[in-house]
Each structure stands twice: as C-alpha cells, then as structure tokens.
Amino acid sequence: MRSKSLSLIALVVASVVAMPGLVQAQQPTRIGASIALTGRDAVQGGYVREGYLLCQKHVNEQGGVLGRAIELLIHDDRSDEPTAVGLYEKLITEDKVDAVLGPYGSPYTDAVADVTERHRKLMVAPGAATTSIWEKGRRYLIMVLSPLEASTAGTIDLAARQGLKTIGLIDARARPAIVKGALELARKQGLEVVVHEAYPPGTTDFSAILHKVKAAKPDVLVAGAPLGSGHLCVMPPLPGSVRARPWLGR
C-alpha cells in the first residue's frame, strides 16, 4: 500500500511538471501566518511580513511551486501569544490553508507550535532561534536560523584569545537565550562573569544596570536584546576599557 501511494504521488508530481498550462488553472497554494504587526513587536514583525511578501513575489514570478502560485494569508497577532495561538487554530481549521509559516519571535513560535503539532501541520519557523523550542519532541517544526545560544561564540572566543579575563552580561528577560548561551560559553573559555544583570520588557532607563557594570569593570560586555531594542544599540560609552557588544535575538 505504501509503495502504491508513493507511486501515485510520483505520478502526480510528474504530471504537474509535464503540464504547466494545466497546473496554472489550478487554485493557488494558500500559506497562512500570524505576525506581530501591531504592539511591542510590530517593528520586527513588520520586517518578517515584508520578507514573506517578497518571497511570495519572487516565487510567483518564477511560476510558483510545482506550477502553482502561492497566496499568503497573514493575520496580526497584536504581539500577544494567546492571540497568535487562536489565529493558527483559525488558519488551519477555518481558513483551511495548505501550509503555515511561523510568527516573529521564539515565544510566539513556541506557543503556536502546540497547535501545528496537534493538527500535524508542518510549520517552517524562520523567525525563531531558541533551541528549547526544538527540545520538546515536536515533529512538524522546522528551524531555519542558527541557535541564539551560540550567537556570541565568536565574540567570546575572540575575547579569550586576546587575553581578556572578565565579562559582563546584560540579559533581556524577554529573550534570555542569548545570555544563557554566553554564560556557558564564557565559563568554557575561562572568562570570569563579574556582573550579570537582567531587565524586564519595556525598560528604557539602564542607568542602574550601567552603574553596576561600571563598578564591576568587565573587560568585555555582552548585551542580549530582542531585535528592535535600539536603546541597547546606542548605549552611552562605557567607562574605562569596557568593550560593549550588543546581540539582537528573536
């Protein structure tokens, strides 16, 4: 039975490739997604939406997938995880999309993956990179980005090879994977963590944290933050020989 099914699939694919004129008359392949288009992650979510639409444009200009155009159905989850969960349920059960793409960000992806797993709907997740999402036995989730936990490996390796001895870490509680990985990498390289501070979402005043960094005098500073956290990218110059390196994550 399995062999017969595979043969039928192969025959259908061969027919699709051989008769593009017939295929163009078919309905487009509908792909659904929920993205943060409003709320705190709207800037980053907007970039993801633009990327998805650009992909749709390029694919369709080249004849689509197996001759079928793709049509994106994108909803706004308003930067809210429960809303995202409900939207993926709707995409699969009501909108009847053929496939789904992931939302922006690891927290949202982790939440909606339970929905796609339950419905056995494959989800490609180009907007998430926290490895814990893929450590839960999920079978219908595809990772695209390299793990956030390894994102500071080059910086910390360079610091160790340059003879630096101490490191400071500034940790965004909304995206802890970057600094979690940096902490482990620093220990493996023999760097002493002299300051490790975390801040909650919505923080705009980093004075208290930076005063602690100043007092600890680390040789190198790694600041992990969600994409779009421009306040960390434009931190005021740090005192002494401290070298600041922001890392942005999903």
Image: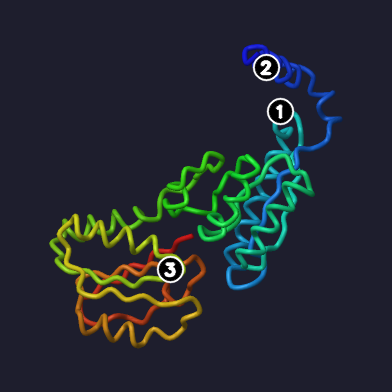
Residue kind at label 2, given as amino acid type:
Ser
Q: Disc 3 to disc 1, how far (Cα)?
A: 40 Å
Q: Residues within 10 Å of mark 2 (few under 14, many from 20)?
A: few
Q: Disc 2 to disc 3, how far (Cα)?
A: 48 Å
Element assignment for label 3: strand
* Residue 5's disc number: 2
Residue 152 horizontal side relative to residue 122, left or right = left
User: Which residue is the site of mark 1?
Assistant: 66
Q: Residues within 10 Å of mark 3 (few under 14, many from 20)?
A: many
Q: Disc 1 to disc 2, how far (Cα)?
A: 19 Å
Q: Position of residue 28 (x, y in %)?
A: 79, 37
Q: Nearer the viewer, residue 64 or 215?
A: 215
Identify the image quadrant of residue 75: bottom right
Residue drawn at the location 28% of the way across and 73% of the way down: 196
Residue kind at label 3, given as amino acid type:
Ala
In this rendering, is residue 100 above or below 159? above
Residue kind at label 1, given as amino acid type:
Leu
Q: Quadrant of the N terminus?
A: top right
User: What colouring does the structure picture have?
Assistant: rainbow
In this rendering, is residue 107 above or below 2? below
User: Which residue is the site of mark 3?
Assistant: 225
Closer to the observer: label 2 or label 3? 2
Choose the circle earlier in sequence order: 1 or 2: 2
Residue drawn at the location 58% of the way across and 44% of the way down: 124
Q: Position of residue 71 (x, y in %)?
A: 76, 44
Residue drawn at the location 56% of the way across and 57% of the way down: 111
Evaluate if marks 1 and 2 touch, with contact meaning CB atoms under 8 Å apart. Answer: no
Residue 191 horizontal side relative to residue 155, left or right = left
Element assignment for label 1: loop
* Residue 148's disc number: none
Q: Nearer the viewer, residue 39 or 131?
A: 131
Choose the circle earlier in sequence order: 2 or 3: 2
